[in-house]
Image (cartoon, grey):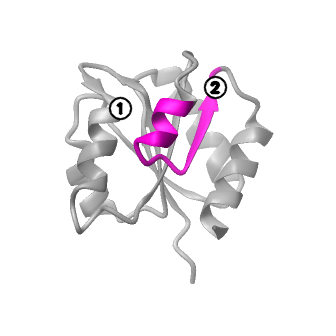
Amino acid sequence: MLNKKILLAEDDVTMVSLLKTLLKMEGFEVVAVHADADVVEEVKKEKPVVLLLDFHLGAQNGLDVLDEIRNQDETRDVRVIMSSGASVKEECMNRGANGFLLKPYMPDDLISLLKQTISA
């Protein structure tokens, strides 16, 4: 069976709850990590098909997390979709994100981008 695990690294607890519900309804397995967790270690442990990564992640910077993911052999190929309320798409894509969503986004936009990213 195909890996349908999505790892959420998001610091807004309401957003995490909504995303978990939405993604589970779409047939994904969802694991959320605490905003202060070591996201790279969680990626290694959980082996998700996609990491949905917030640009502003508590005390962490999403771009720093993305850089670390891309610089390690074990995690370099994980697909990463970043999200932010700021217009930072170009910066995220230039640093190696596979996709970007500007908050607030519609659920259909997320599902569409996830399916596109997974099949790429």
Location of mark 2 (residue): 102
Splitting the image into 4 quarters, where does residue 77 fall? bottom left
Q: Which residues are magenta?
A: 90-103
User: Callout 2, which amino acid?
Assistant: Leu
Q: Secondary structure at mark 2?
A: strand
Q: With 49 as the anchor, is 36 left or right in this view?
A: left
Q: Pointers 2 and 1 in contact (CB under 8 A)?
A: no
- Taking the view exactly as shown, the residue that stands out farthest to the right is 108
- Label 1: few (<14), some or many (≥20) within 10 Å? many
In the rendered structure, does residue 3 fall within the stretch colored magenta? no
Residue displayed at 70% across by 59% down: 116
| 63 in relation to 58, above or below | below
| Residue lying at 79% horizontally and 41% vertically, measured from the top left | 108
Identify the secondary structure beneath mark 1.
helix
Q: Earlier in the sequence, mark 2 or mark 1?
A: 1
Mark-to-mark CA distance, 2 and 1: 14 Å
Q: What residue type is disc 1 on?
A: Gly
Q: Nearer the viewer, residue 63 or 42?
A: 63
Disc 1: which residue: 62
